[in-house]
Image (spheres, rainbow, N blue to C red):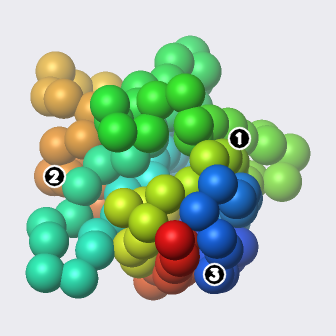
């Protein structure tokens, strides 16, 4: 498993931007798949953006396409989520996740991920 530490959350007005970071450490094999999930109060956790760290392929939830960008800095072992044009509906706890290998399951299948961070809160006010 991988240790994941998120940062960068905060409070912002609608239309604003935030960049989340997730530093990965204590792994022997670099995670194959990394992703951002979020969970709003009273709602199930949902996938936001995912990335194949080998191919660079990316996948986004429809609700964030065109507004959020997932990226990685291999030298820093860091995953980012750039969030622009934020909406109150984006308010949630955001979690970084890592998974070990390829599978035929959809990108946001949570069982694909065996390491999770503690989360960072994002609050968007109208």
Depicted 22 relative to depicted 85: above or below: below
The percent position of residue 11, horizontal first and vertical second, equals: 63, 81
Image quadrant containing the N terminus:
bottom left
* Nearest to N terminus: mark 2 or mark 3: 3
Q: Is residue 116 above or below residue 57?
A: below
- Asked whether 42 or 86 is in front, the reply is 86
Q: Position of residue 3 (x, y in %)?
A: 53, 73
Element carrying mark 3: strand
Q: Is residue 70 visible?
A: no
Crowd around label 3: few <14 · some 14–19 · many ≥20 (10 Å):
some
Looking at this view, is 19 or 108 the one in front? 19
Give the residue drawn at x 28%, y 74%: 40
Counting from the top left corner in percent of width and height, residue 61 is at 33, 35
Q: Earlier in the sequence, mark 1 or mark 2?
A: 1
- The residue shown at (16%, 21%) is 104
Residue to which mark 1 is pinned: 72
Give the numbered dot on residue 11. 3
Q: Mark 2 — residue?
A: 111
Residue located at (23% from left, 82% from top): 41
Left or right, residue 14 beside residue 82: left
Q: Quadrant of residue 14?
A: bottom right
The residue closer to the viewer here, 6 or 126, is: 126
Which residue appears at 65% of the width and 81% of the height?
10
Residue at mark 3 to residue at mark 1: CA–CA distance: 24 Å
Task: Determine contact: label 3, label 1, CB under 8 Å.
Answer: no
Q: Nearer the viewer, mark 3 or mark 1?
A: 3
Determine contact: label 2, label 3, CB under 8 Å. no
Can you say whether 65 is above or below 125 in the image? above
Is there CB contact under 8 Å for labels 1 and 2? no
Using residue 15 as the reference point, say whether residue 101 is left or right of it: left
- Classify mark 2: helix, strand or loop: helix
């Amino acid at each position: 498993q991988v240790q994941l530490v998120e940062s960068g959350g905060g409070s912002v007005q609608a239309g604003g931007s935030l960049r989340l970071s997730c530093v990965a450490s204590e792994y022997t094999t670099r995670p194959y798949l990394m992703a951002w999930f979020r969970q709003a109060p009273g709602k199930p956790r949902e996938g936001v953006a995912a990335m194949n760290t080998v191919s660079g392929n990316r996948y986004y939830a429809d609700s964030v396409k065109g507004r959020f960008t997932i990226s990685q800095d291999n030298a820093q072992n860091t995953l980012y989520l750039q969030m622009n044009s934020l909406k109150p509906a984006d308010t949630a706890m955001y979690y970084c996740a890592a998974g070990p290998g390829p599978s035929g399951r959809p990108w946001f299948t949570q069982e694909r991920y065996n390491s999770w961070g503690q989360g960072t809160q994002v609050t968007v006010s109208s």
